[in-house]
Amino acid sequence: MKKLLAILLVLVFAFSVVACGGESAGTSDDKSADFGNNSVDEPSEDESSADVSDDTSADTSDEGNDAPALEMISQFITWKNAFYNGGIVGTTAYDLTSLFLHKLNASVEAGENGVFTRAYGTSIKDEGQDYAEFAVVVFEYNHALFGYVKTSFAAVGSANAETAIPEDGFVAVIHSDNEGQISAIEALSEETVFFPKGFAVNTELDATINSAATAPVLDGNVTEEEYGAAIWDLNPDSKLACYGQFEAGNYNATAKVYLTYDAEKLYCGIIVKTPDHFCDLAADNAVGMWEKTCIQFNICSVDPRGDYMMEGKWDQDGGVHDAANSNILRQMGVAVNNDGESLKTPFFCINQIDNMETFNVRNNETQTTVYEFAVPWSDIGLEGETFVAEAGTVFGFSISVNSGTATRKFQTITLRDGGGIIGTNDWTKIPAITLGE
């Protein structure tokens, strides 16, 4: 227990989990927090310290013991008030609803906790490791609950060293020092949803897009001739879409997402089918569209699961603002208001530079909304460095389809595991997009 407390004290300020952009765990019952943080300030000294990749050591040894301190990584697993069920997360490092990790897809040592995904292999087998001092828990994605649930639990001393890693899930190995977390996880029901933070489990949303022979015209008419085939077909039957914020069984929205590019811009077309449409905003207050009917999207100039993010830069809601403050990531929104006017707004970005073009149109008779936007590559990336849009380049892109009405907020389609938008701004959940020929 002394080891657990030492680790938690080091990390307690690093993981302030929130429901939407500006909402803190301490105000999780208030959905009115301003998500539109369109001018991200430089992090304060306290916020900067939240980047646990800079100093993640914790003294887990007793006084006089020469055992080395364990190095924490910024990834962890959380449960309690899953983010996609109402847009609220109540987890903090003060309670027993988080398991912090030392290793991801790598051998664990005494005192360490680790996670294994299919990126590691088909089982947790590790030469010389019998996991005798670890509890081993298998988690699999449950499409009915739109999250990961416990499907197998092996107490300390009973683990199978060849436990299979599920095709759509992960395995956690928890050292016996973590008695509280082990007991809590064992006691939780099979319908408790767990959420992995700081690492991607399912990467099937990753895609390759082709360049446009001719730049798409932003006119509200999205065709395969302009964009190519849709990269994502988001519907209730798709395991890549999360409908956790909808009334169970009443999944009344679908979306098809198209993406193409040229040397100057990224082009996106989205066709949404839903009877719900409400956006009573104008250009001067468009930043509030996140709680109306709109599209939110992330565009990231680096591979969201590459070295930059894995060094601890993924956790916007935990106070690690490096990606947004350096313009590596921009979170933006587009909408069409009740008067038919196309709107746009930045949420997270380093400055007000916004050369995005957009044209959006709603047809109430067909219950269809079409969104089109084009983002110049020059709007993203480190100052002085030009994003090179050529075949083989990998960047990050994700969306959420918000369909709030005059009386209801957060009935939103998200990509699997949140897509790095709704519920938690975890940039590792952004799909990786490769530029094709």
Image (cartoon, rainbow, N blue to C red):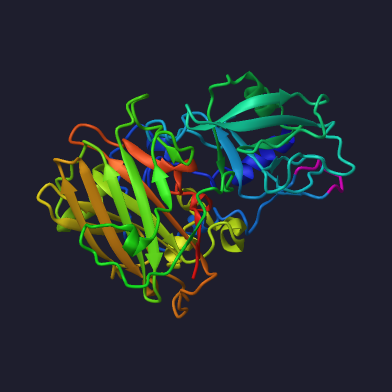
Q: Residue at x 30, y 43 (%)?
A: 402
Quadrant for residue 114, please give it. Answer: top right
Quadrant for residue 233, please give it. Answer: top left
Position of 147 with respect to 251 (left or right) is right
Position of 152 with respect to 280 (left or right) is right
**Position in image of residue 70 (x %, y %):** 75, 48
**Position in image of residue 13 (x %, y %):** 53, 46
- Number of marks in the image? 0
**Position in image of residue 81 (x %, y %):** 46, 29
Q: Nearer the viewer, residue 243 or 65?
A: 243
Quadrant for residue 155, please give it. Answer: top right
Q: Which residues are magenta?
A: 60-67
Give the residue furthest to the front: 225
Q: Residue at x 42, y 67 (%)?
A: 327
Give the residue furthest to the right: 128
Q: Main secondary structure of the magenta part?
A: loop
Q: Is residue 374 above or below residue 134?
A: below
Q: Is residue 173 above or below residue 213?
A: above
Position of 253 with respect to 120 (left or right) is left
Q: Is residue 30 visible?
A: yes
Q: Quadrant of the N terminus?
A: top right
Q: Is residue 39 visible?
A: no
**Does the magenta run of residues contain 40?**
no
Q: Residue at x 24, y 64 (%)?
A: 218
**Does the magenta run of residues contain 62?**
yes
**Position in image of residue 371 (x %, y %):** 26, 54
Q: Is residue 383 above or below residue 8?
A: below
